[in-house]
Image: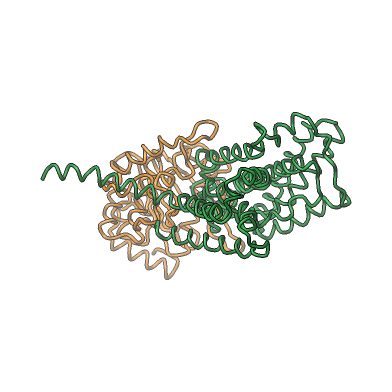
Amino acid sequence: MDYILEMRDITKSFGEVQSLRNVNFRVAANEIVGLLGDNGAGKSTLIKIITGYHRPDSGEILFRGQKVEDLTVPKARALGVETVYQERALADLQTLWRNIFLGRELSNRFGVLQVKRMKEETHRLMVEQMGYTSSAVNPDSVIKTFSGGEKQGVAITRALYFHAELVILDEPTMGLSLHETRKLLNFVRDIKVAGKSAVFIDHNVFHVYSVADRVVVLDRGQIAGEFLTKDITHDELMEKMYRVAQTGSLD
Amino acid sequence: MTARVENSKPERARYAALTQFARRNGLQIGIVGVMLGIWLLFIIGAPETFLKKDIYRALMTSVPYWGVIALPLTMVIIAGDIDLSFISIMAVGMVAFWEGYDLTNSLGIAFAAALVSGFLVGLLNGIIIVKMGIPSLIATIGTQFFWRGVVEVVRRGQGESLTLARDTVLRDVLVSKVGGYVPAQVIWMILVALVVWFILNRHKLGAHTYLIGDNEGSARLMGVNVDRTRMLLFALVGVASAFGGVLQSLDVWYFWPNLGEGYLMNTLAAVFLGGTSVFGGTGTILGTFVGCFIIGAIQPGIIAVGLTGYWTKLIYGLIITVSVAMHAIVRRRME
């Protein structure tokens, strides 16, 4: 099987708190992996290691079978990892186009920005991806006034724009309306159709179950177990989640 | 009926475009308005001064000494930091200038030594602030004293006459009167403004400056090199400070070891008057540029309209407070 991402024996501590212990985590090509776990299980730490934001204390990270040393955010983005963070990672006082290209501005080799191109691309994305038609919103709009769902739309569109091979979604349904949530789940299914991979983190087991090929359960910094969604019913998965929260064991 | 619909559409679009322009540039329109208002008051109050060109020559002579620093300082403040040490870096640059000249007898090398020393001292500010995690407000209070102290120890309080720069290319280029009237330093200030505007609005460094000041966490998550950007901005202020110090010293033919003292509040006031937010994330170069000349004009203006010098600080305070309050209101309106 082809793996787009392999993490071997990952350990990470923050001061005295051991956040991850000997975690092995893989994502296959064109696979949607759901990552479940209670608060403090280490989900966010794990994905922030994938995105290059945190360095693991020990362990290896491989992209497409190639070991990557000193993974940083720009390196991870260059390898095709794009992330929709729980905290959205937007800059509220800045314009839409600056947010779309945040940290990956289009520029020439001297670092001079291609402002016109970025605005045009943003306009195209607004029409084709975000479905904006109102003239009140344009690439120069400051995003502070956007609703939670609209901001999420910006974060997702940004992840899409850079042709991500692996999209990471950290609690993306938080604060979304029912309609927006359904749109988001369809977006995750589209990732699968497009032949790309995703890691999907959500508190809502039902959301994860409905889109993931495989579910990985993280508990107190360790992998407690994993299931293919086709081998388990939603109720069984819920049952196991409760058990793991109480006893630390799935069975 | 149909004709009316067709007519109203482009009209509405034009109106929408106009309001959006006003929204986007509200702060800059505001500061230009403030400038014109104060100017008008001074012209009415003291036509014999403000309708003659001497006052404008005086402003163009002295404002650039610190104006060239206010411009890159705007970027530091947009990034959410502040620098209070630039007044001492002005003098450090001139110490390097003098030592460089002493060693090589070359004014060109002396000038380069000043700029390089300014860059390094500014970079050191950045390193202390970023790598040790000290808030810039506190760190640069410390370095302001430290570098002034270094200048005083090295110079033992002694100044230095710069008449050796008479009829040299360097002095002509930096501070001569172009066409017998326009001080060259104001042209340098305009050039610095254009360069800083370009960096801030058309270069990655500027894009990252806005992002860091707006939301440092987001900038880090999305891969912006926050540390390097912040350090570089302090280094830029350092270079500009040394440059301002050279401009003033060459212009007055003398290097005073207390060079820069008295400019701290003016310079900061110009940046904030110009609409740059102390919270970071917003600010413009045009605003700071105009802010510099408003601050520079207040003192001579007050005296020219016949008030005593005692009024200066009161009116300074009033204009700055009212303007900053106005910015806060405009900013809320824009949202």
Farthest front residue?
B48
Residue A201 point in image, percent of width and height: 39, 55
* Chain corresponding to orange in the figure: A
Residue A142 visible to the viewer: yes
Q: In the image, what residue occupies the spot 69% across and 45% down?
A: B241
Quarter of image, res A165:
top left
**As drawn, is B156 to the left or to the right of B60?**
right
**Count of labels in the image:** 0
Q: Position of residue A184 (x, y in %)?
A: 30, 52
* Chain ID, green in image: B
Q: Is residue A49 something that shows in the picture? A: no
Which quadrant holds the N terminus of chain B? Answer: top left
Find residue A19 and report its horizontal and vertical position in percent: 53, 60
| Towards the viewer: A251 or A104 | A104
The residue nearer to you, when weighing A202 against B100, is: B100
Q: Which quadrant would the C terminus of chain B be assigned to in this image? A: bottom left
In the figure, B174 relative to B78: above or below?
Answer: above
